[in-house]
Image (spheres, grey):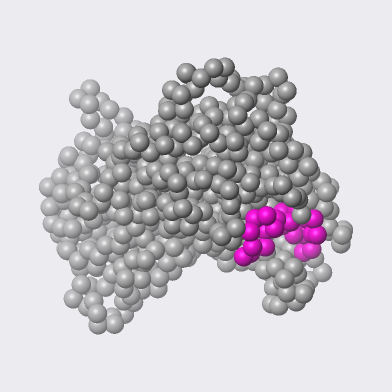
Amino acid sequence: MTPKPTATPAAGRSGGVATVRTVGARPVAPGDPTGRSAAAASATTADGTTARERLLAERQGQVVTGAQAIVWSLEALGVTDVFGIPGGNVIPLYDALMSATGLRHILTRHEQGAGHAAEGYAASTGRVGVAIATSGPGATNLVTPIADAYLDSVPLLIVTGQVFSGLRGTDAFQEADIVGITMPITKHSLLVTTVDEIPDALASAYHLASTGRPGPVVVDIAKDAQQASAPFRFTPEPALPGYRAYTRVSHAQIAAAVTLMRSAERPVIYAGGGIVRSGASAELAALVELTDFPTVTTLMARGVIPDSDRHQLGMPGMHGTVPAVLALQEADLIVAIGARFDERVTGDPAHFAPLARVIHADVDPAEISKIRHAEVPIVGDAAAVMTQLAAEWAAWASGAAAAPTRAASATPTARAASQPRNPGIATWWQRLDGLREQFPLGYDEPLDGLLSPQYVIERLGALSGPDAVYASGVGQHQMWAAQFIGYERPHAWLNSGGAGTMGYSVPAAMGAKVAEPHRTVWAIDGDGCFQMTNQELATCAVNSIPIKVAIINNSSLGMVRQWQTLFYDNRHSFTDLDTGHGSQMVPDFVKLGESYGALALRVRTAGEVDAAIELALATNDRSVVIDFVVSPEAMVWPMVPQGVGNSEIQYAPAAAPVWGDE
């Protein structure tokens, strides 16, 4: 087995209004833009006002159409980029967009693409992503990205058109109750039927989407409300009765948590995607260094602590590293922050971490003790919770004898013998370091002689570096990208974690590139996923959004095929796609890429990999599509089969580590 090279060095959905929220690593006032292009609008003058504030003051009270009020409200909120497709019931809005000076509208080729692009925009920056669609099928095409954003806590503002208010309930042309449809998969859904409601509805939606536990909010606006006129009245901080703020963390709970942390012999910090959404990676790093606790990062939290950090054990769960999986399984204390104990991490919850007590901190109280009982529940934003945990720990440690000091090591596994540790968990670290030495991430070369997908992804990450953004589709390539790319910063890894949405990658990469044009952005896609949303390469070509696409082409729906191989006696029922080696190659991804104006390449051997990636990295005037024709026999390992406990982890076929006292 080839070892993986060592890497080089928010409130719940029903609550959480905060006076100041954190996006990325910066404090941001509600409604204030946080984007690159909003700097000038936010620059203050001698009288202490910003250009945007002065423009808003000039617009207040002007009689405008509802459509114009939508545009002005988005601009007042600091929105700079929107994705969408026009249709009959948003024609008034699109007419107003044509003369907008502060908004860039990107015409996508499918509403699902608009939604995923808004997700990629939001996930790569922490800002609110905005998508627009018309009523009926336009709005329902957004349901998948809305559900995706809901499960992954991505802040989205979805604006849809609706039929004339007098026609509602008559089965009018392109009528669909999108508020009712999306209510279970949004933080909130609002129907607007009068022009006066528009500014407050949008301000409320933006605030709900971006505060507490982030998520999608839908604002459905009737066509007659868009056409009617009224004085423009915008309030950046609307009153939201019933939206409860969780701004204060209980000190009693913090003290109780640190008491458990002090006495733990086998502690683990279980870091989830909520830390990324909170912009709290610095607070996590400080807590980890202070306590010397080993840390695992979920699929949604990759990069929140650098892979080069010596405390990082890797990703837990079904396809996690052996040290991460067994650290949770053998722990006597789990400090879960911004994580939700989903079944892909726990396996069978009844057999998960049987000896562990749990501290569970989350901005959404509904997540705490939902799956695993927490001995110490803490409701609060991840940044605030970790800051207070660190302060409480430091206060205790300052009175303890010989408090350990720490310094970063060059690699996660090379912990210098002279480096002091938390003496109370020295034996625990010996166990975990032993697991890291014995079970490093790696892969076997395919027996069929074809290109290894793991090698492709490993080289892509090594050549592109930690400053790039990697947006993955769903399946085997998603797991390999999570495993074999070294992540050193948050927001570098984008994927559909909760919903597992095929087709996410290309539009999400496009949205990330719009948000951060200075970064290299890769869409790492499978041949199945790519065929679902590749039309957004046309959007990239027309709008000069040069992304790079790596198709991991194993000519099949790879993850389903893996399960069929392992659990269904090699019965590969309807998973062959005929796109790769020895097949008809329909479609031909090189010809398809070229038809979209991209530089398109095909790679079949390991010797061609680096040159193709380097050419892609050097090409920035258009998108690049690389068809990596890889082995269909490659599988994702390690693996915990579904429905069993994590102690059943398989490192490779027929190879399982010994855990605990066995």
**Front residue (pair 644, 568):** 644
562 horizontally vs 343: left or right: right
Q: Position of residue 224 (x, y in %)?
A: 20, 68
**Front residue (pair 608, 401):** 401
Q: Position of residue 258 (x, y in %)?
A: 46, 33
Looking at the rendering, which quadrant does residue 473 occupy?
bottom right
Residue 76 position (above or below residue 583): above
293 magenta-colored: no
Q: Position of residue 590 (x, y in %)?
A: 70, 60
Q: Position of residue 320 (x, y in %)?
A: 65, 50
Which residues lie in the magenta part? 630-655
Residue for point 22% across, 53% down: 242
Residue for point 18% across, 58% down: 197
Is residue 226 something that shows in the picture? Answer: yes
- State how many labels appear: 0
Looking at the rendering, which quadrant does residue 21 occupy?
top left
Is residue 127 something that shows in the picture? Answer: no
**Front residue (pair 527, 237):** 237
What kind of secondary structure does the magenta stretch mostly adopt?
loop
Residue for point 75% across, 69% down: 565
Q: Residue furthest bottom?
A: 170
Looking at the rendering, which quadrant does residue 94 occupy?
bottom left
